[in-house]
């Protein structure tokens, strides 16, 4: 492989950039906002059917209350008419008495209706309070989702920008290196999942896989200077 010490310094810089790009990609894929937004959305989706339940119940209760109000209104009209008849009957005692009995029944029914209506109105008030709580909870989830999405987009764009900048720097650096050195480095990086370049340390040790190279293998490797291949992990080693 055609290489001099200056090339290897540049290649180390290329490796540093490649690792940073990989980290930026990994960070993009695991941004916490993505997971958080899914959680908040799920929470909101769980509240929606509860709200629908309360809305349905409120509607049904309000319909019951309207029915009672209608009945009460018609009874009030009946009372008015009966009162007119009693007044008109004057001294016709029997006629007045029969209407008075009717009126007592109607009055009793209206008291019962009022009680029932009060009960229903209290229920409706409670439902409205629950509904407000649920609607507020949904609105809070929506606001949180928006804020997480904004924060996600911002961080993601930042990482994309960073990766682009690094890739530009890499292109620049690589243009000054021998083609075969770059090809070998790229192939090795693909196989090793990132760190393709290490050093042969004192005592014949590979700085990446830590295995000790000795005897004939070390002599072979030294012969490949300034850059050889670790017989153990197959990474490029600067000698
Ligand atoms: Zn090695």
Image: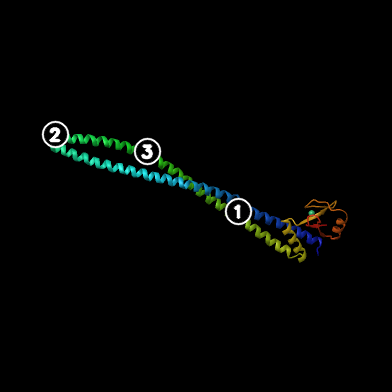
Is the C-beta separation of discs 2 and 3 under 8 Å?
no
Point 12% across, 35% down: residue: 92
Q: Residue at 79% x, 61% y: name it.
A: 6
Q: Nearer the viewer, residue 54 or 186?
A: 54
Q: Earlier in the sequence, mark 2 or mark 3?
A: 2
| Badge 1 or badge 2: first in the primary sequence | 2
Q: Badge 1, how many Cα within 10 Å: few under 14, some, many 20+?
A: some
Distance CA(mark 1)–CA(mark 2): 91 Å
In percent of width and height, residue 76 lies at 24, 40
Residue at numbered disc 1: 155
Q: Which residue is mark 2?
A: 94
Q: Nearer the viewer, residue 173 or 185?
A: 185
Question: Tag on residue 3?
Answer: none
Which of 155/128 is in front?
128
Ligand 1 quadrant assignment: bottom right
- Tell me what residue is drawn at x 21 percent, y 36 percent: 103
Q: Is residue 178 visible?
A: no
Circle 1 or circle 2, nearest the eye: 2
The mark nearer the N terminus, 1 or 3, is 3
Residue 107's quadrant in the figure?
A: top left
Q: Secondary structure at mark 2?
A: helix
For marks 1 and 3, give the one nearer the viewer: 3
Q: Quadrant of residue 233?
A: bottom right
Number of callouts in the render?
3
Is residue 97 depicted above or below 28 in this figure? above
Helix, strand or loop under label 1 = helix
């Amino acid at each position: 492989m055609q290489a001099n010490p200056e090339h290897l310094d540049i290649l180390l810089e290329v490796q540093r950039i490649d690792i940073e790009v990989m980290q930026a990609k990994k960070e993009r894929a695991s941004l916490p906002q993505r997971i958080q937004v899914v959680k908040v959305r799920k929470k909101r989706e769980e509240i929606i059917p509860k709200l629908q339940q309360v809305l349905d119940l409120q509607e049904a209760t309000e319909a019951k209350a309207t029915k009672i109000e209608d009945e009460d209104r018609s009874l009030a009209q009946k009372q008015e008419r009966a009162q007119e008849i009693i007044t008109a009957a004057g001294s016709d005692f029997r006629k007045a008495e029969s209407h008075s009995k009717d009126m007592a029944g109607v009055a009793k029914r209206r008291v019962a209706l009022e009680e029932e209506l009060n009960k229903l109105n209290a229920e409706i008030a409670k439902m409205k309070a629950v509904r407000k709580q649920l609607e507020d909870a949904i609105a809070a989830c929506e606001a949180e989702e928006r804020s997480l999405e904004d924060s996600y987009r911002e961080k993601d764009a930042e990482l994309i920008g960073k990766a682009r900048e690094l890739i530009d720097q890499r292109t620049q650096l690589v243009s000054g290196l021998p083609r075969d050195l770059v090809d070998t480095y790229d192939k090795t990086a693909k196989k090793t999942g990132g760190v393709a370049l290490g050093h042969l340390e004192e005592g014949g040790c590979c700085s990446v896989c830590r295995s000790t190279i000795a005897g004939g293998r070390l002599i072979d490797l030294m012969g490949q200077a300034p850059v050889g291949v670790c017989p153990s992990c197959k990474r490029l080693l600067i000698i």
